[in-house]
Image (cartoon, helix red, strand yellow):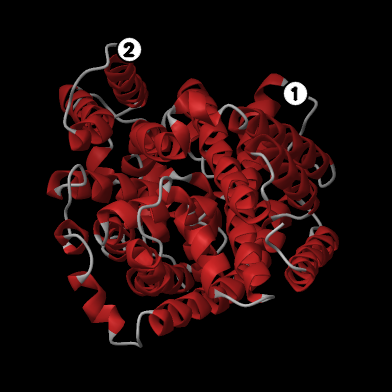
Amino acid sequence: MTLQLLDWIVIIVFFLIMVVIGVWAHYKNKDSDDYFTAGGNLPWWLSGISHHVSGYSGAVFVAYAGLAYTHGVSIYVWWAMTVGISILVTINIFPVRWVRLRKKIGIQSPLEYLSIRYGIKTQQVIAWSGVILKLFDVAAKWAAIAILLKVFTGIPILYGVLFSGGVSIVYITIGGLWAVTVSDFIQFIVQIGAGIAMFFAAASKLGGLDSVFTIWNQLPAKNSEPFAEPYTVGFALAFLFINMLSYNGGTWNLATKYISSPNELNTKRAAILSGVLYLIWPLILFFPMWAAPILLPNLENPTESYGLLTITLLPKGMIGLVLASMFATTMSMTSSDANTISAVITRDILPLHFKRLKVSSSTNPLIVARKVTFIFIFFTILIATQYESFGGILGLIVAWFAALVGPIAVPMLLGMLPLFKKSGSTAALVSIFGGLISFALIKIFSLSLPFALEISLPLIVSVFLYILLGFINRKTIVSPEVLKLLEAIDEKSEN
């Protein structure tokens, strides 16, 4: 056992705080609106921090730490920088439209408006596709935290998945969005403290703050290059467009943070805060990971580098704080995902197939949502135990999630814009299936494509088909309901 008693005390206290937040939020939820959107009353600073934190997970300290070890600064360029840019350049496009949808037509789930925009059948295809995709994404997070547990404690990965998932499933089913966002804020404070401690510990070991600039002379030349094979300029551009869809609502839990803002001004402030944090904070967070080849040379498994750095550099108690922050990072993302998936299943899927589940009820949706959350997390844990079958953690996050989020997000995000009003349900379905089929063909036939094209091809195909079908149907009359919807969310609301 690497962890000392003080480390375990820190971790236990942290988990107790999370449980207290969950219990507090449990009693704060009076109806499904509170559970899924915090009643539309999320402060901008809490929404922005939650949006930012929900983009992280334990995978950052495992898969991304491994890439920082082997490829250097390119991980910041193609991940953090592209996320920050994609959020900041679209603050007047997508975030404001999400909050308008709640204020003008009363949505609680990001997919509710799609029944008007494309019809029930298309909405169901998107709903089911997204739920299945999230099973793999959340599973990757459990596997990542299990690897960290193995580094710190020696617990086998299988038991680590079961432990982390089992602990989290209890917390996640207790609270709604209030629990998610408040715990995100606490987690952010812990992450800042742990990250700064690691930054100064690494800098001190390397000779002081000047090491921020001098370590690059001791590292391979490619580690200081912004683009290192296979993470080229093309890959970064592909990820920029994928992130532009994902972080603006293609990843549903991030849309929820915008939906839950009280007005457009607040949602813009939240987006700006999240985007700026993505540009600044990872520079501090990644520094120890970039310096790891100097501090821990010739590692056989670079994905263990951050955990080993923590053990090497930090004193008792601080190791527990860093591990707690990694746990909390994963919990914040998975709880946020589970809350939004519950909203989609409870609001958009179950009522269609089970008429007795009336979404207007103030009790039924809460009970159903908690059951759905439990079942969803249970299946993600099962998938996580088989993560190697899907190409490891990086394979699940990049090759699966990044490649598949585009086709599902295209009709969701572009469907909000009047420019694409002629792209109806057929365009939405063809774009989704076209993107998914292109991904399947790549996998089935093991096509030898450049990594950038492999990741971006499903998105390229989906966007092309969506726009093409809209152009072909340019003379088709758009239904009054769709025109009214687009007009409502295109018009600025009073703050």
Residue drawn at the location 79% of the way across and 69% of the way down: 5
The quarter of the picture where the N terminus appears is bottom right
Q: Where is residue 163 in the image (x, y as percent from the top left)?
A: 74, 44
Image location (x, y in percent) of residue 343: 64, 42
- Where is 91 relative to 67, above or below? below
User: Image check: 278 left or right of 348?
Assistant: left
The residue under label 1 is which amino acid type? Lys
Identify the residue at horizontal 36%, vertical 43% (top origin).
Answer: 413
Q: Is residue 69 above or below residue 142?
A: below
Identify residue for label 1: 355
Q: Left or right: where does residue 201 sit relative to residue 230?
A: right
- Which residue is more in the foreground, 98 or 397? 397
Tell me the residue at 49%/23% (across/down).
389
Q: Splitting the image into 4 quarters, where does residue 86 fall?
A: bottom left
Residue 360 seen in this snapshot: no
Q: Position of residue 471 (x, y in %)?
A: 16, 28
Residue 73 locus on image (x, y percent): 25, 62
In this view, the mark in front (2 or 1): 2
- Residue furthest toward the top? 445
Res 444 label? 2
Mark 2–mark 1 Cα distance, whole angstroms, equals: 39 Å
Hey, what amino acid is under mark 2?
A: Ile
Q: Residues within 10 Å of mark 1 (few under 14, many from 20)?
A: few
Q: Residues within 10 Å of mark 2 (few under 14, many from 20)?
A: few
Secondary element at image label 1: loop
Choose the circle earlier in sequence order: 2 or 1: 1
